[in-house]
Image (cartoon, rainbow, N blue to C red):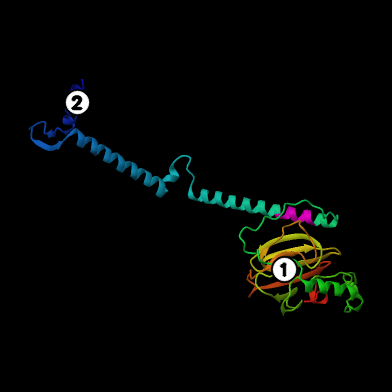
């Protein structure tokens, strides 16, 4: 039985390899016009090669030429760009809506004195970049606060409209050299304090984180709402350690000194104080 199968396969391969001649003759003169010598195996190979070439050409025309726009169900390039643009705008609107919702909720919590908002704990820093930074108040900071509290009566004279701020004990956000002072005429609504890179920035008073974000001019910034309609703003940070809605204490680290934003020319903190919607000079209330 095996010999019979072997003989049949041998006959089949011989058939594929057999040579045949295709001749086209003139019907009137019987003169030979075209003569092609081929085998069944060669014919099958030629058909496969033509099929592969044609398939490749069709796929290339559909994928890399405008002909694909005429295929039913396949959108045009303009439509695809429009869909991507709408998708990006929808994502941006969603992020903006979430930020505004958190912003409004933070304001409502401040107005209602509802500071015990439940929020997720900040994720642990696994990069190890800030593991060696000391965020606890230093002995000099604690000594300054105690000295300030014991000598409130000897404080500098303050304008009557800021008398409500005289009783507040402001914590120095960061120790350093003041490179630019408060100047309303030049629209510089705060002071610039040059400090060491990766120095922790601390909250000036107890409060609630009202907003955190990034802008091309100010880089990473954080805004804290305090009592008495007082707001503090910290700009050009390299990292933000708190998120919107977090309750912070005076002297608690909220960010890291950085050099972010187009207005920054080196590691420093731009610190602003706003009272009743008006920018005030931080040097009148905070000792740097």
Q: Which mark is residue 134?
A: none
| Mark 2 surroundings: few (<14), some (14-19) or many (≥20) residues within 10 A | few
In depth, the one of 270 and 103 nearer the eye is 270
Label 1, on which residue? 201
Residues rendered magenta in the picture = 99-106
Query: Do the residues bearing badges 1 and 2 touch, measured as CB atoms within 8 Å?
Result: no
- Name the secondary structure under disc 2: helix
Q: Residue furthest top?
A: 1
Percent x, y of residue 284: 82, 76
- Which callout, 1 or 2, points at the residue further toward the start of the chain? 2
Is 104 magenta? The answer is yes
| Mark 1 surroundings: few (<14), some (14-19) or many (≥20) residues within 10 A | many
Query: Looking at the image, which residue is at 18% across and 22% down?
Result: 4
Label 2, on which residue? 6
Residue 66 placement, left or right of 143: left
Is 13 magenta? The answer is no
Residue 157 placement, left or right of 6: right
Q: Quadrant of the N terminus?
A: top left
Q: Is residue 187 visible?
A: no
The part of the image, by quadrant, that contains residue 2 is top left
């Amino acid at each position: 039985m095996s010999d019979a199968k072997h003989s049949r396969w041998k006959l089949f391969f011989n058939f594929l390899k057999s040579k045949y001649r295709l001749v086209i003759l003139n019907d009137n003169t019987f003169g030979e016009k075209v003569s092609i010598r081929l085998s069944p195996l060669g014919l099958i190979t030629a058909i496969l090669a033509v099929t592969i070439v044609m398939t490749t050409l069709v796929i290339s025309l559909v994928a890399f030429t405008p002909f694909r726009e005429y295929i039913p169900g396949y959108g045009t390039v303009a439509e695809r760009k429009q869909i991507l643009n709408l998708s990006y705008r929808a994502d941006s609107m969603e992020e903006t809506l979430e930020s505004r919702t958190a912003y409004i909720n933070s304001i409502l919590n401040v107005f209602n004195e509802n500071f015990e908002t439940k929020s997720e704990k900040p994720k642990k820093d696994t990069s190890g970049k800030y593991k060696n930074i000391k965020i606890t108040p230093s002995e000099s900071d604690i000594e300054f606060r105690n000295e300030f509290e014991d000598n409130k009566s000897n404080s500098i004279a303050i304008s009557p409209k800021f008398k409500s701020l005289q009783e507040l004990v402001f914590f120095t956000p960061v120790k350093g050299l003041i490179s630019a002072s408060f100047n309303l005429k030049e629209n510089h609504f705060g002071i610039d304090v040059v400090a060491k890179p990766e120095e922790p920035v601390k909250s000036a008073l107890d409060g609630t984180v009202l907003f955190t974000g990034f802008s091309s001019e100010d880089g990473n910034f954080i805004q804290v709402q305090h009592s008495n309609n007082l707001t503090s703003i910290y700009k050009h940070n390299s990292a933000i350690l708190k998120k919107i809605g977090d309750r912070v204490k005076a002297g608690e680290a909220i960010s890291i000194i950085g050099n972010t934003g187009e207005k920054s020319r080196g590691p420093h903190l731009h610190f602003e104080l706003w009272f009743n919607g008006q920018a005030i000079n931080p040097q009148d209330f905070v000792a740097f």
